[in-house]
Image: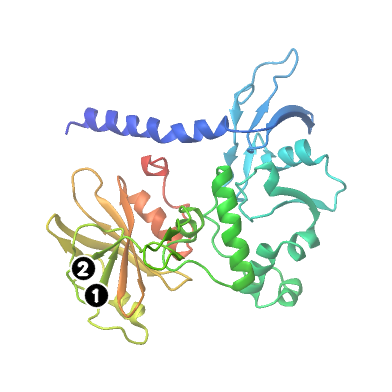
């Protein structure tokens, strides 16, 4: 494929990938105008804002266009010209800030979910004590609320790269899962936090024998390695470095074998060699591979123990190394700042 053809293909994919976000901008139920910090905005209950042009003033870059805001990598919030969008939305739908002691609480702790029903004005203390999701995250990180109040800077809250702009349906599903996690201490098995929060909820089906409702089976495929299971991975594959049996520290012993350059997987379409591997805070092994195919030459996989076998779950394929490394960093709880934005961020 010529370079010009490749660029045209990437631009076309980039354009197609941005369409859903454009559709989300205009999917709303309520819209109202609000004055905020010397500006006038129109706000939608889906978290989008539209800044009015200043009378008799020059038109600015973000005037008179709908946006969810631009992501601030340091704070994790969406902004428009230095104003955090969540305060604009909260002011529009829940009234002005009651006093300087109040902050906006993202109920599901997703700082990019600025839907009006996900925001509320609370004091800083209430933000911790009244939100079960925030409280549980702090307790898991610090051991107790007392330890947090004694020295809030002693530890950092785990990686927040799972956050994203969401639809109403995604917001409802993720909040249910987070509340269940806060109440029971249970999370999904395998995958990154984002995978667990935002993948579609499994549909129940009725057994023709018993009539009872159960969850469908995982999308598993037989592996060519006896001690391995494949998930979301259709082609039967061999995993040469996979330990022959489960033992104490099984995932760690697997990691020790995954030095850069060794073959991680092999099937009828070719081999994937290890670029980088690591274990996340949830105990899941994350692996980035070079997988030459002529289109998407990079891949990501997650490995964890399930039912006395090493479950190998596909984490996707990528056009760029940076795209695959971002997925890896998210899985192991590492920052992604070192990797540039690419077409993979929109696909």
Relative side of 234 to 249, left or right: left
> Percent from the top left, x then y, of residue 37?
78, 33
Looking at the rendered image, the quarter that the C terminus falls into is top left
Say if 12 sits above or below 284 in the image.
above
SS at circle 1:
loop
Looking at the rendered image, the quarter that the N terminus falls into is top left
Relative side of 86 to 259, left or right: right
SS at circle 2:
loop
Residue 42 in which image quadrant: top right
Q: Residue at x 19, y 64 (%)?
A: 237
Query: Any mark on residue 242, and which?
Result: 1
Number of residues whose C-alpha sits closer than 10 Å to that of mark 2, classed few (under 14), some (14–19) or many (20 or more): many
Check disc 2 and report the residue beneath it.
Answer: 223
Give the mark nearer the N terminus: 2 vs 1: 2
Number of residues whose C-alpha sits closer than 10 Å to that of mark 1, classed few (under 14), some (14–19) or many (20 or more): many
- Which residue lies most toward the right here? 99
> Percent from the top left, x then y, of residue 19?
44, 31
Residue 114 in which image quadrant: top right
User: In this view of the protein, can residue 215 be seen by the observer?
Assistant: yes
> Percent from the top left, x then y, of residue 213?
46, 63
Q: Residue at x 31, y 34 (%)?
A: 10
Say if 92 sits above or below 160 in the image.
above
Q: Residue at x 61, y 46 (%)?
A: 113
Of 164 and 206, nearer the camera is 206
- Which residue lies most toward the left here? 268
């Amino acid at each position: 494929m010529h370079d010009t053809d490749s660029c045209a293909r990437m631009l076309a994919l980039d354009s197609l990938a941005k369409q859903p976000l454009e559709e989300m901008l205009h999917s709303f139920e309520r819209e109202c105008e609000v004055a905020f910090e010397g500006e006038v905005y129109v706000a939608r209950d889906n978290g989008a804002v539209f800044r009015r042009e200043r009378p008799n003033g020059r038109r600015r870059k973000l005037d008179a266009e709908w946006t969810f805001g631009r992501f601030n990598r340091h704070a994790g919030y969406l902004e428009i010209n230095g104003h955090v969008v969540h305060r604009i939305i909260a002011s529009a739908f829940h009234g002005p800030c009651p006093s300087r002691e109040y902050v906006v609480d993202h109920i599901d702790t997703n700082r990019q979910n600025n839907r009006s029903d996900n925001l509320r004005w609370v004091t800083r203390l209430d933000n911790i004590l009244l939100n079960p999701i925030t409280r549980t995250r702090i307790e898991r990180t610090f051991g107790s609320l007392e330890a947090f109040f004694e020295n809030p800077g002693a530890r950092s809250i785990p990686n927040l790269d799972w956050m994203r702009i969401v639809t109403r349906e995604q917001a409802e599903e993720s909040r249910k899962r987070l509340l269940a996690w806060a109440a029971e201490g249970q999370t999904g098995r395998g995958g990154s936090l984002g995978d667990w929060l935002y993948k579609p909820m499994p549909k129940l089906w009725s057994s023709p024998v018993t009539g009872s409702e159960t969850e469908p089976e995982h999308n598993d495929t037989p592996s060519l390695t006896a001690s391995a299971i494949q998930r979301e991975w259709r082609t039967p594959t061999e995993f040469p470095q996979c330990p022959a049996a489960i033992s104490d520290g099984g995932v760690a012993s697997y990691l020790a074998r995954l030095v850069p350059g060794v073959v991680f997987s092999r099937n009828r379409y070719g081999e994937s060699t290890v670029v980088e591997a690591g274990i996340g805070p949830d105990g899941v092994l994350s692996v980035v591979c070079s997988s030459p195919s002529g289109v998407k030459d990079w891949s990501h996989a997650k490995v964890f123990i399930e039912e006395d076998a090493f479950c190998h779950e596909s984490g996707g394929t990528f056009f760029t190394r940076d795209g695959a490394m971002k997925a890896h960093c998210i899985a192991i709880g590492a920052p992604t700042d070192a990797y540039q934005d690419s077409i993979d961020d929109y696909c």
